[in-house]
Image (tube, grey):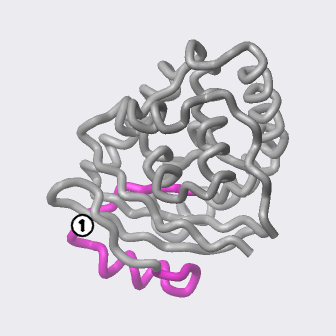
Amino acid sequence: MTTQSPFTELDLNAITEQRWVDRNDFTGDEFERARAFYEQMRADDERLERVRTKASDLIIEWTGHKPRDVGSFGTRLNLESSDLDLGIGYPAEDRDRLREVLEPHTTFLGERKTRFSTSRLVFSFTLDGIEIDLSALTVEDFAVACRMLDQIDTTMTLDERIAHTWVKHLLRSSGRVKEYAAWKLTTYARFCPEFNWVPIPEKPSA
């Protein structure tokens, strides 16, 4: 089924080129539409938080390492179809053991580049109908990711989150797949340019 793209007064080409958007780029009416949409996305927060807590407890039980939300739900930039993306820091030399530990509980999705000389292992499992992607980063990369997420938590304003999420929604609804994939990474790039976060490929829609 084809979904009609929402009306927008934004110049999406200019915004994706400048790789950021804020309140000043919006008319008053458009920002109210964006705010209303953002509030709709927040309606599922409590359920996702409950699932995230259960998933985190399982990951601690399996690996002995406490995860952190490294995805769009953790930064409150998620759309309604959001899965959960959790990450742990794990010694690279012990990754074979980690795969053995997680094999009975998860599906191994492969290895992804993270920075110039490092990578992460990605696993997946489903809990209460929510897909959980678990990334095992190097200990050093996990520390960098946590610093980046801390900075986003304390620095990114609510208006910026509303604006970013609205553009993300517009790009996805318009079928602009490449721009959508790139836009999801703009927050990470803005707050932590040193961290090259290569995303897990988008799952096809049902």
Q: Is residue 138 left or right of residue 62?
A: left
Name the residue at 30% across, 41% down: 144
Point out residue 120 in the picture as x, y percentages from the top left corner. 33, 64
- Residue 75 lies, with reference to residue 2, above or below; the image says above
Point out residue 104 in the picture as x, y percentages from the top left corner. 55, 86
**Residue 86 drawn in magenta:** yes
Name the residue at 33% across, 61% down: 90
**Residue 198 drawn in magenta:** no
Name the residue at 52% across, 27% down: 153
Residue type (three-letter) at the residue carrying disc 1: Ala
- Residue 124 lies, with reference to residue 69, above or below; the image says below
Q: Is residue 84 left or right of residue 190?
A: right
Q: Is residue 30 left or right of residue 69?
A: right
* The C terminus - image quarter: bottom right
Name the residue at 48% across, 50% down: 179
SS label for mark 1 = helix
Q: Which residue is mark 1?
A: 92
In this figure, what is the number of numbered marks? Answer: 1
Using the rendered view, name the quadrant where residue 75 is placed.
Answer: top right
* The N terminus - image quarter: bottom right
Residue closest to the eye, 147 or 44:
44
Point out residue 116 in the picture as x, y percentages from the top left corner. 17, 55
The magenta-colored residue range is 85-108
- Residue 16 lies, with reference to residue 206, above or below; the image says above
Q: Residues within 10 Å of mark 1 (few under 14, many from 20)?
A: some
Q: Is residue 19 left or right of residue 156?
A: left
